[in-house]
Amino acid sequence: MRHQRHGRLRRPRPGPWTIVGRRLAGPCSSAAALEPGQAFEIATGAPVPVGTEAVLPVELSIVDGAPGTHDAESPGRTVSGVLPAKNHIRRRGEDVPRGRRILQAGTVVTPAVLGLAASVGYDNLRVHRRPRVRVVVSGDELLTTGLPTLGQVRDAIGPLLPGLITAAGGELVDTQFAADRAGALSEALACDDVDVVAVCGSTSTGPADHLRPVLGAQKADILVDGVACRPGHPQLLATLPDGRHVVGLPGNPFAALAAGHTLLAPLLNGLAGRSPKAPLTGRLRGRIAARDRETRLVPAVRTDDALVPVGRDRAGSLWGAAMADVLAVVPPQWTGPEVEVLPL
């Protein structure tokens, strides 16, 4: 329901004012104007007549000595009332002046962004599409359902990646499982319908780790070959000759999660055109042993005044990460208490 309001002249004078017309929201074929002592009944959202200086809400108006009504036969009647301090008029350009940039390139298109674009007259937006990702989980020992038996472990990395990929601006195409053979890994990489292949496991240098030899055979350009970070140090980033990216995630679940946040997610954000966010920081409470030469990622929960480590942070376990809401980034030889924070 639209509330009717009564407009009045630019040069204020005490009421009563004579009602000379009515205007509802919608296109107008002619421009009305107010003379001194005149008023218009006007619906919320309708353009005000030329010369209008303020709007008297109908609930504050007195028409012919009685509270304001919505009578369609109002012209010729009089209206009075005390004008509020706010004039209730929205002027053209007061929110977004002509020529003003309202959002920067790299802004994520949210529902609010779509509504804002429509409100200022945009019918189409140029956007980055979501980078398409294929997940390849390698390992003969992996089990995807049920309880593992001797020599088996449940795949914990495959289930955590879809949410991480989506949050980072990517689109998961599919998840494939590859045996611990170079040929199987080569076949999994032979796809031209994705932008990124995320390989889980096979990133170290053991006899069953085939990713580096396979990338070498495909003449890939290796950009990141391990990082000084625990967990997650055997991570890898390479670019294939056709422009596709390959991200190698460690086989240990917490290490894979850490590499996903520090390598895969930034890559996807960049490919999606997202602007980098300013680093978050916090004060880490408790005794944390910093490493001499490596950064340490510590699962923690955020309280009002500090970050509290939750423990349970072995590379092969997601227990601590599941209890945490951030990873505290503890640099080499850290003495505390300030650290950078990676939200989970």
Image (cartoon, rainbow, N blue to C red):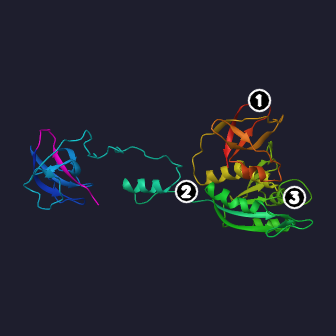
Mark closest to the chain's N terminus, 3 or 1: 3
x, y percentage for residue 79?
Answer: 12, 49
Asked if residue 7 lies in the magenta stretch, the reply is yes
Q: What residue is rendered at 75% in x and 68% in y? A: 176
Residue at mark 3: 209
Residue at mark 1: 335
Tell me the distance, in whole angstroms, between the alpha carbons under discs 3 and 1: 36 Å
Which sits in the foreground, 288 or 229? Answer: 288
Which sits in the foreground, 48 or 87? Answer: 87
Asked if residue 337 lies in the magenta stretch, the reply is no
Which residue extends farthest front?
66
x, y percentage for residue 131?
Answer: 62, 59
Which sits in the foreground, 206 or 54? Answer: 54
Q: Residues within 10 Å of mark 3 (few under 14, many from 20)?
A: some
Image quadrant assignment for residue 138:
bottom right
Q: Which mark is residue 301?
A: none
x, y percentage for residue 173?
Answer: 66, 67
53 on left or right of 107: left
Question: Is label 3 or label 1 in front?
Answer: 1
Q: Residues within 10 Å of mark 2 (few under 14, many from 20)?
A: some
Highlighted magenta segment, given as a residue range: 1-15
Check whether the beta carbons of the residues at disc 1 and disc 2 lie within 8 A of each other.
Answer: no
Which sits in the foreground, 253 or 43? Answer: 43
Image quadrant assignment for residue 210:
bottom right
Q: Is residue 33 in sight in this rendering? A: no
Tell me the distance, in whole angstroms, between the alpha carbons under discs 2 and 3: 35 Å
116 on left or right of 294: left
